[in-house]
Image (cartoon, grey):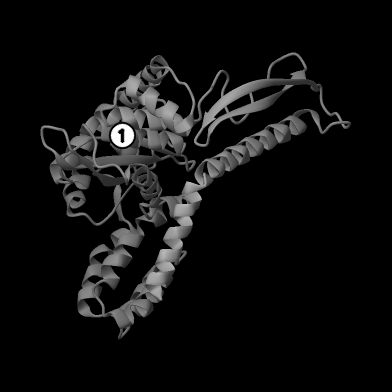
Amino acid sequence: MAERNKQKEFDCVKSFFQKGGYPHLMQTYQNSIQIALQRELEAWADEICGPRGKPKGSFRRNGYYTRGLLTAAGWVELKVPRFRGGKALPPPIFKPYQRHAVKIILLWITLFSLNLSCRNISKVLATVFGASVSFQTVYRWVKKAHRFTENAVTGDICEDYFAVILDGVYGRVRDSETPGKGVLPASLGVTGDGDVSLLGVTPALTESPDSWAEHLQSLINRGLKPDSVKIVTTDNHIAFSKTIPKFFASAAHQPCIFHTSMDVTAKVPIADRNKVKSLLSRLWSAKTPWGYFMALAKINSSPVINERALSCLHRHAEDAMAYFEGPENLVKKVRTTNQIELLFRSFRSRTRKLRGWQTYESLEGMLILTADSKGILKEYT
Protein backbone atom coordinates (compact mmCIF):
# COMPACT_ATOMS: atom_id res chain seq x y z
CA MET A 1 0.00 0.00 0.00
CA ALA A 2 2.80 2.40 0.92
CA GLU A 3 4.66 1.60 -2.31
CA ARG A 4 1.50 2.25 -4.32
CA ASN A 5 0.99 5.65 -2.67
CA LYS A 6 4.60 6.58 -3.37
CA GLN A 7 4.16 5.64 -7.02
CA LYS A 8 1.02 7.79 -7.25
CA GLU A 9 2.86 10.75 -5.76
CA PHE A 10 5.76 10.25 -8.17
CA ASP A 11 3.39 10.04 -11.16
CA CYS A 12 1.59 13.20 -10.03
CA VAL A 13 4.85 15.19 -9.75
CA LYS A 14 6.07 13.77 -13.08
CA SER A 15 2.89 14.79 -14.91
CA PHE A 16 3.08 18.25 -13.30
CA PHE A 17 6.49 18.93 -14.87
CA GLN A 18 5.65 17.23 -18.19
CA LYS A 19 2.57 19.42 -18.70
CA GLY A 20 4.50 22.64 -18.06
CA GLY A 21 3.25 23.12 -14.54
CA TYR A 22 6.53 24.51 -13.22
CA PRO A 23 6.66 27.58 -15.51
CA HIS A 24 2.99 28.24 -14.73
CA LEU A 25 3.74 27.98 -10.99
CA MET A 26 6.68 30.42 -11.27
CA GLN A 27 4.54 32.84 -13.29
CA THR A 28 1.85 32.71 -10.61
CA TYR A 29 4.48 33.33 -7.93
CA GLN A 30 5.88 36.28 -9.90
CA ASN A 31 2.39 37.79 -10.33
CA SER A 32 1.72 37.39 -6.60
CA ILE A 33 4.94 39.23 -5.73
CA GLN A 34 4.10 42.01 -8.18
CA ILE A 35 0.57 42.43 -6.75
CA ALA A 36 1.88 42.48 -3.17
CA LEU A 37 4.52 45.12 -3.96
CA GLN A 38 2.02 47.24 -5.88
CA ARG A 39 -0.44 47.14 -2.98
CA GLU A 40 2.30 48.25 -0.60
CA LEU A 41 3.11 51.20 -2.87
CA GLU A 42 -0.58 52.19 -3.02
CA ALA A 43 -0.88 51.98 0.77
CA TRP A 44 2.21 54.18 1.08
CA ALA A 45 0.69 56.76 -1.30
CA ASP A 46 -2.63 56.76 0.61
CA GLU A 47 -0.77 57.34 3.88
CA ILE A 48 1.01 60.40 2.46
CA CYS A 49 -1.78 62.21 0.62
CA GLY A 50 -4.91 60.26 1.57
CA PRO A 51 -7.04 57.91 -0.54
CA ARG A 52 -8.48 59.10 -3.83
CA GLY A 53 -11.17 61.71 -3.29
CA LYS A 54 -10.10 62.38 0.31
CA PRO A 55 -6.83 64.37 0.10
CA LYS A 56 -4.85 65.26 3.20
CA GLY A 57 -1.69 67.28 3.83
CA SER A 58 0.20 69.34 1.22
CA PHE A 59 0.94 66.44 -1.18
CA ARG A 60 -1.29 65.51 -4.11
CA ARG A 61 -1.07 62.55 -6.49
CA ASN A 62 0.53 63.19 -9.87
CA GLY A 63 0.22 59.93 -11.79
CA TYR A 64 2.79 57.11 -11.88
CA TYR A 65 6.18 56.19 -13.26
CA THR A 66 7.28 52.65 -14.03
CA ARG A 67 10.12 50.93 -12.22
CA GLY A 68 11.53 47.47 -12.92
CA LEU A 69 12.78 45.40 -9.99
CA LEU A 70 14.55 42.04 -10.06
CA THR A 71 13.18 39.88 -7.24
CA ALA A 72 13.52 36.23 -6.23
CA ALA A 73 10.48 35.54 -8.43
CA GLY A 74 12.01 37.25 -11.46
CA TRP A 75 11.64 40.66 -13.10
CA VAL A 76 8.53 42.64 -12.10
CA GLU A 77 7.25 45.98 -13.41
CA LEU A 78 5.85 48.35 -10.76
CA LYS A 79 3.85 51.58 -11.04
CA VAL A 80 5.31 53.98 -8.49
CA PRO A 81 3.03 56.90 -7.48
CA ARG A 82 4.17 60.45 -8.14
CA PHE A 83 3.30 63.44 -5.93
CA ARG A 84 2.89 67.19 -6.24
CA GLY A 85 4.32 68.94 -3.22
CA GLY A 86 7.77 70.31 -3.79
CA LYS A 87 10.08 67.36 -3.18
CA ALA A 88 10.39 63.77 -4.30
CA LEU A 89 9.57 61.06 -1.76
CA PRO A 90 11.48 57.75 -2.08
CA PRO A 91 9.27 54.64 -1.91
CA PRO A 92 9.69 52.47 1.19
CA ILE A 93 10.33 49.13 -0.56
CA PHE A 94 13.46 50.16 -2.49
CA LYS A 95 16.05 52.92 -2.54
CA PRO A 96 16.38 55.52 -5.34
CA TYR A 97 17.77 53.99 -8.55
CA GLN A 98 17.67 50.49 -7.05
CA ARG A 99 16.85 47.80 -9.62
CA HIS A 100 17.60 44.63 -7.67
CA ALA A 101 16.19 43.21 -4.43
CA VAL A 102 18.56 42.68 -1.51
CA LYS A 103 18.20 38.88 -1.71
CA ILE A 104 19.37 38.92 -5.33
CA ILE A 105 22.44 40.98 -4.42
CA LEU A 106 23.26 38.54 -1.61
CA LEU A 107 22.95 35.73 -4.16
CA TRP A 108 25.54 37.44 -6.38
CA ILE A 109 27.97 37.79 -3.48
CA THR A 110 27.41 34.17 -2.42
CA LEU A 111 28.11 32.89 -5.93
CA PHE A 112 31.23 35.06 -6.18
CA SER A 113 32.43 33.67 -2.83
CA LEU A 114 32.00 30.18 -4.30
CA ASN A 115 34.55 31.08 -7.01
CA LEU A 116 32.16 31.97 -9.86
CA SER A 117 33.29 34.80 -12.10
CA CYS A 118 31.15 37.90 -12.61
CA ARG A 119 30.46 36.86 -16.21
CA ASN A 120 29.24 33.41 -15.13
CA ILE A 121 27.06 34.96 -12.44
CA SER A 122 25.48 37.16 -15.10
CA LYS A 123 24.74 34.05 -17.19
CA VAL A 124 23.21 32.28 -14.17
CA LEU A 125 20.86 35.22 -13.53
CA ALA A 126 19.79 35.25 -17.18
CA THR A 127 19.09 31.50 -17.09
CA VAL A 128 17.29 31.33 -13.73
CA PHE A 129 15.42 34.65 -13.59
CA GLY A 130 15.23 35.53 -17.27
CA ALA A 131 16.74 38.94 -16.52
CA SER A 132 19.75 40.50 -18.18
CA VAL A 133 22.27 41.81 -15.63
CA SER A 134 25.65 42.91 -16.90
CA PHE A 135 28.79 41.49 -15.34
CA GLN A 136 29.91 45.08 -14.63
CA THR A 137 26.89 45.51 -12.35
CA VAL A 138 27.69 42.26 -10.55
CA TYR A 139 31.32 43.33 -10.12
CA ARG A 140 30.30 46.74 -8.75
CA TRP A 141 28.12 45.17 -6.06
CA VAL A 142 30.72 42.55 -5.16
CA LYS A 143 33.35 45.27 -4.78
CA LYS A 144 30.99 47.37 -2.67
CA ALA A 145 30.24 44.37 -0.42
CA HIS A 146 33.97 43.72 -0.02
CA ARG A 147 34.59 47.31 1.15
CA PHE A 148 31.53 47.13 3.40
CA THR A 149 32.58 43.92 5.16
CA GLU A 150 36.19 45.09 5.49
CA ASN A 151 35.03 48.32 7.15
CA ALA A 152 32.79 46.36 9.54
CA VAL A 153 35.75 44.44 11.01
CA THR A 154 38.40 47.17 10.93
CA GLY A 155 36.51 50.40 11.75
CA ASP A 156 36.77 52.16 15.10
CA ILE A 157 34.25 51.35 17.86
CA CYS A 158 33.27 54.68 19.42
CA GLU A 159 30.17 53.74 21.43
CA ASP A 160 30.06 52.48 25.03
CA TYR A 161 28.35 49.11 25.51
CA PHE A 162 26.69 47.88 28.67
CA ALA A 163 26.91 44.20 27.72
CA VAL A 164 28.78 42.03 25.20
CA ILE A 165 27.44 38.69 23.91
CA LEU A 166 30.02 36.17 22.65
CA ASP A 167 29.52 33.00 20.61
CA GLY A 168 30.89 31.23 17.55
CA VAL A 169 29.40 29.63 14.44
CA TYR A 170 31.01 26.91 12.32
CA GLY A 171 31.27 26.74 8.53
CA ARG A 172 33.05 24.54 6.00
CA VAL A 173 35.96 25.86 3.93
CA ARG A 174 37.08 23.59 1.10
CA ASP A 175 39.74 25.37 -0.98
CA SER A 176 42.13 26.87 1.53
CA GLU A 177 45.57 26.22 3.01
CA THR A 178 43.77 24.51 5.91
CA PRO A 179 40.51 23.07 4.47
CA GLY A 180 37.85 21.74 6.81
CA LYS A 181 35.49 23.23 9.35
CA GLY A 182 36.33 26.72 10.53
CA VAL A 183 34.77 28.79 13.28
CA LEU A 184 33.78 32.45 13.32
CA PRO A 185 34.06 33.91 16.84
CA ALA A 186 31.59 36.81 16.84
CA SER A 187 30.45 39.39 19.36
CA LEU A 188 27.37 41.56 19.78
CA GLY A 189 27.25 44.76 21.78
CA VAL A 190 24.20 45.87 23.78
CA THR A 191 23.95 49.54 24.72
CA GLY A 192 22.18 50.89 27.80
CA ASP A 193 19.19 51.77 25.57
CA GLY A 194 18.87 48.18 24.36
CA ASP A 195 20.31 48.66 20.85
CA VAL A 196 22.11 45.55 19.57
CA SER A 197 24.90 45.66 16.98
CA LEU A 198 27.59 43.36 15.63
CA LEU A 199 31.00 44.38 17.01
CA GLY A 200 33.25 42.10 15.01
CA VAL A 201 34.09 38.70 13.55
CA THR A 202 37.45 36.94 13.55
CA PRO A 203 37.91 33.74 11.48
CA ALA A 204 39.71 30.92 13.31
CA LEU A 205 40.37 27.20 12.97
CA THR A 206 38.99 26.19 16.38
CA GLU A 207 37.03 27.75 19.23
CA SER A 208 39.99 27.82 21.61
CA PRO A 209 41.10 30.29 24.31
CA ASP A 210 43.72 31.64 21.91
CA SER A 211 41.16 32.33 19.15
CA TRP A 212 38.84 34.12 21.58
CA ALA A 213 41.76 36.08 23.02
CA GLU A 214 42.68 37.21 19.51
CA HIS A 215 39.07 38.23 18.83
CA LEU A 216 38.68 40.22 22.06
CA GLN A 217 42.05 41.89 21.60
CA SER A 218 41.02 43.04 18.12
CA LEU A 219 37.86 44.62 19.58
CA ILE A 220 39.89 46.48 22.20
CA ASN A 221 42.37 47.65 19.57
CA ARG A 222 39.45 49.07 17.57
CA GLY A 223 38.22 51.09 20.54
CA LEU A 224 36.00 48.89 22.70
CA LYS A 225 36.24 50.05 26.32
CA PRO A 226 36.39 47.03 28.66
CA ASP A 227 35.67 49.21 31.72
CA SER A 228 32.28 50.29 30.32
CA VAL A 229 31.16 46.67 29.85
CA LYS A 230 29.24 45.44 32.91
CA ILE A 231 28.06 42.00 31.70
CA VAL A 232 29.61 39.48 29.30
CA THR A 233 27.15 36.78 28.19
CA THR A 234 28.42 33.48 26.78
CA ASP A 235 27.52 29.81 26.58
CA ASN A 236 29.28 27.31 28.86
CA HIS A 237 32.30 26.71 26.61
CA ILE A 238 35.47 26.18 28.66
CA ALA A 239 37.42 28.76 26.61
CA PHE A 240 35.46 31.67 28.11
CA SER A 241 36.41 30.89 31.71
CA LYS A 242 40.03 31.58 30.75
CA THR A 243 39.62 34.64 28.54
CA ILE A 244 36.80 36.70 30.11
CA PRO A 245 38.66 37.53 33.37
CA LYS A 246 41.72 38.56 31.37
CA PHE A 247 39.97 41.12 29.14
CA PHE A 248 36.91 42.13 31.22
CA ALA A 249 38.18 42.14 34.78
CA SER A 250 35.44 44.45 36.09
CA ALA A 251 32.55 42.79 34.21
CA ALA A 252 30.28 40.02 35.47
CA HIS A 253 30.36 36.79 33.45
CA GLN A 254 26.75 35.80 32.67
CA PRO A 255 26.37 32.16 31.51
CA CYS A 256 23.44 31.70 29.15
CA ILE A 257 20.52 30.38 31.20
CA PHE A 258 19.27 28.31 28.25
CA HIS A 259 22.59 26.48 27.86
CA THR A 260 22.75 26.01 31.63
CA SER A 261 19.27 24.47 31.64
CA MET A 262 20.25 22.12 28.81
CA ASP A 263 23.40 21.02 30.68
CA VAL A 264 21.48 20.38 33.91
CA THR A 265 18.57 18.46 32.34
CA ALA A 266 20.98 16.29 30.35
CA LYS A 267 22.29 14.86 33.64
CA VAL A 268 18.94 13.57 34.96
CA PRO A 269 16.88 10.57 33.78
CA ILE A 270 14.59 11.23 30.81
CA ALA A 271 11.49 10.51 32.92
CA ASP A 272 12.36 13.37 35.31
CA ARG A 273 13.44 16.01 32.79
CA ASN A 274 10.08 17.76 32.48
CA LYS A 275 9.90 18.20 36.25
CA VAL A 276 13.46 19.57 36.33
CA LYS A 277 12.64 21.98 33.50
CA SER A 278 9.65 23.22 35.49
CA LEU A 279 11.86 23.87 38.53
CA LEU A 280 14.45 25.69 36.42
CA SER A 281 11.71 27.77 34.79
CA ARG A 282 10.70 29.06 38.22
CA LEU A 283 14.34 29.83 38.95
CA TRP A 284 14.85 31.91 35.80
CA SER A 285 11.49 33.71 36.16
CA ALA A 286 12.42 35.10 39.59
CA LYS A 287 12.11 38.90 39.65
CA THR A 288 14.51 39.56 42.56
CA PRO A 289 17.68 37.95 43.95
CA TRP A 290 15.67 36.85 47.00
CA GLY A 291 13.17 35.04 44.79
CA TYR A 292 16.08 33.52 42.89
CA PHE A 293 17.62 32.05 46.05
CA MET A 294 14.23 30.76 47.24
CA ALA A 295 13.73 28.93 43.92
CA LEU A 296 17.30 27.59 44.12
CA ALA A 297 16.65 26.27 47.64
CA LYS A 298 13.56 24.46 46.39
CA ILE A 299 15.64 22.83 43.65
CA ASN A 300 18.23 21.71 46.22
CA SER A 301 15.54 19.92 48.25
CA SER A 302 13.80 18.37 45.25
CA PRO A 303 14.09 14.56 45.00
CA VAL A 304 13.95 14.56 41.18
CA ILE A 305 17.37 16.18 40.69
CA ASN A 306 20.51 14.13 41.33
CA GLU A 307 23.95 15.15 42.56
CA ARG A 308 25.50 15.44 39.09
CA ALA A 309 22.78 17.86 37.96
CA LEU A 310 23.02 19.84 41.22
CA SER A 311 26.78 20.13 40.86
CA CYS A 312 26.38 21.44 37.31
CA LEU A 313 23.74 23.96 38.41
CA HIS A 314 25.75 25.21 41.40
CA ARG A 315 28.78 25.70 39.18
CA HIS A 316 26.88 28.38 37.24
CA ALA A 317 24.13 29.44 39.69
CA GLU A 318 25.90 32.41 41.23
CA ASP A 319 27.22 33.76 37.91
CA ALA A 320 23.78 33.30 36.32
CA MET A 321 22.46 36.07 38.61
CA ALA A 322 24.54 38.74 36.85
CA TYR A 323 21.54 40.03 34.87
CA PHE A 324 20.02 41.40 38.11
CA GLU A 325 22.74 44.09 38.02
CA GLY A 326 21.41 45.54 34.77
CA PRO A 327 18.32 47.62 34.03
CA GLU A 328 15.02 45.81 33.71
CA ASN A 329 14.67 46.54 29.99
CA LEU A 330 17.90 44.60 29.25
CA VAL A 331 17.21 41.46 31.28
CA LYS A 332 15.91 39.34 28.39
CA LYS A 333 18.72 40.47 26.08
CA VAL A 334 21.69 39.85 28.37
CA ARG A 335 20.81 36.65 30.23
CA THR A 336 20.86 34.43 27.12
CA THR A 337 22.80 34.25 23.87
CA ASN A 338 19.52 34.31 21.90
CA GLN A 339 20.41 37.61 20.20
CA ILE A 340 23.48 36.14 18.53
CA GLU A 341 21.86 32.74 18.00
CA LEU A 342 19.16 34.40 15.88
CA LEU A 343 21.91 35.84 13.69
CA PHE A 344 23.56 32.41 13.40
CA ARG A 345 20.24 30.79 12.48
CA SER A 346 19.80 33.18 9.54
CA PHE A 347 23.42 32.58 8.56
CA ARG A 348 22.98 28.79 8.59
CA SER A 349 19.77 28.98 6.57
CA ARG A 350 21.66 30.85 3.84
CA THR A 351 24.69 28.56 3.82
CA ARG A 352 23.19 25.18 4.75
CA LYS A 353 23.00 23.81 1.19
CA LEU A 354 26.49 24.98 0.19
CA ARG A 355 29.31 22.45 0.19
CA GLY A 356 31.86 24.95 1.40
CA TRP A 357 33.45 28.34 0.90
CA GLN A 358 36.66 29.24 -0.90
CA THR A 359 38.26 31.13 2.00
CA TYR A 360 37.62 31.98 5.62
CA GLU A 361 37.23 35.62 4.55
CA SER A 362 34.26 34.65 2.33
CA LEU A 363 32.63 32.90 5.29
CA GLU A 364 33.24 35.97 7.42
CA GLY A 365 31.80 38.28 4.78
CA MET A 366 28.56 36.33 4.51
CA LEU A 367 28.03 36.50 8.29
CA ILE A 368 28.57 40.28 8.22
CA LEU A 369 26.13 40.72 5.33
CA THR A 370 23.60 38.56 7.21
CA ALA A 371 23.99 40.86 10.22
CA ASP A 372 23.37 43.86 7.97
CA SER A 373 20.17 42.30 6.60
CA LYS A 374 19.03 41.72 10.22
CA GLY A 375 19.60 45.41 11.00
CA ILE A 376 22.30 44.87 13.65
CA LEU A 377 25.32 46.22 11.79
CA LYS A 378 26.62 49.72 12.44
CA GLU A 379 28.66 51.63 9.86
CA TYR A 380 31.92 52.08 11.76
CA THR A 381 34.15 54.96 10.72
To which residue does mark 1 refer? 200
Helix, strand or loop at label 1? It is strand
Residue furthest right in the image:
53
| Residue 290 visible from this viewpoint | no
Nearest the viewer among 120 and 329 is: 120
Instruction: Answer with the quarter of the image where residue 377 lies.
Output: top left
Q: Quadrant of the C terminus?
A: top left
x, y percent for residue 147: 34, 20
In the rendered image, the residue lying farthest to the left is 177
Q: Residue at x 64, y 39 (%)?
A: 36
Nearer to me, 57 or 246: 57
Indicate left or right for 170 with 321 as reference: left
Left or right of 205? Residue 269 is: right
Residue 115: x and y in percent read 25, 28
Query: Which quadrant of the structure image shows residue 31?
Result: top right
Give the residue type that dot 1 points to. Gly
Q: Is residue 360 visible?
A: yes
The image position of residue 177, as x and y in percent, is 10, 32
Q: Locate the N terminus by quadrant.
A: bottom left
Question: Quick one: 8 or 41, which is closer to the camera?
Answer: 8
Q: Residue at x 39, y 42 (%)?
A: 162
